[in-house]
Image (cartoon, rainbow, N blue to C red):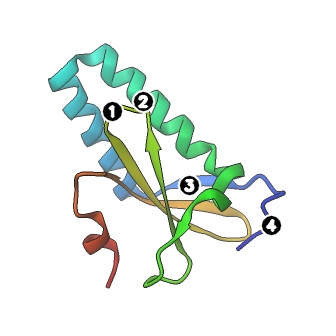
Amino acid sequence: MASNASNLTVVFSEASRDEIASIWLYNAGEYGTDHADRYEEFLKAEIRALGQTYAEGRRLESRPGIFFKTVRWSQRGHAHVVVYRVTQESVNVLHVFHTAQDWRNYVEP
C-alpha cells in the first residue's frame, strides 16, 4: 500500500456511482429529497477523505489489496461499507454497501 503521507486521488467505479444513486433513491423515498441530498453529500465527503485516510480501512483477508471502511452518519443510525483498492496514485472505490447487506459474500471469493 502507498504511504499514508500522500494525498491520493479517489476514483469512483461505475458500480459505486450506481450504488450511491440507489442509496439516494432509497433515502428520498423514505425520508425526503433534502435528507437524501444531505446524506449523499456526507457519504461522498467521507469517501473522498479516503484519499488521505485510506490506511484506516481494514483488509479483506481473502482478497489481497482490497480494503473496507464503515461510514456512519450518526451513532444510532445505519451505516455503509465502502470497499476499495489502493494503488500508488489512487484510491479506487469499488462498491458502497449498506451494512445490512451480505456484502462480504459479494466481494469475497
Give the distance between the C-alpha atoms of the residues marked 2 and 3, in whole angstroms.
Answer: 25 Å
Q: Which residue is the site of mark 4?
A: 3
Left or right of 109, for residue 29: left
Callout 2 crowding tier (Cα within 10 Å): few <14, some 14–19, many ≥20: few
Q: Classify mark 2: helix, strand or loop.
A: loop
Check disc 3 and report the residue beneath it: 11
Identity of the amino acid at label 4?
Ser
Which residue: 31% across, 49% down? 18
Give the residue type at disc 1.
Gly
Q: Amino acid at mark 3?
A: Val
Q: Are marks 2 and 1 in contact (CB under 8 Å)?
A: yes
Q: Residue at x 37, y 22 (%)?
A: 37
Label 3 to label 1: alpha-carbon separation: 26 Å
Residue 57 sits above or below residue 72 on the image: below
Up-down: is 34 above or below 80? Answer: above
N-term-proximal mark, 2 vs 3: 3
Residue 74 badge: 2
Query: Alpha-carbon distance for marks 2 and 4?
Result: 30 Å
Q: Determine whether, in the image, residue 85 is placed left or right of residue 28.
A: right
Q: Nearer the viewer, mark 2 or mark 3?
A: 2
Residue wearing tag 1: 77
Q: Earlier in the sequence, mark 3 or mark 1?
A: 3
Residue that extends furthest to the left in the rendered view of this protein: 29
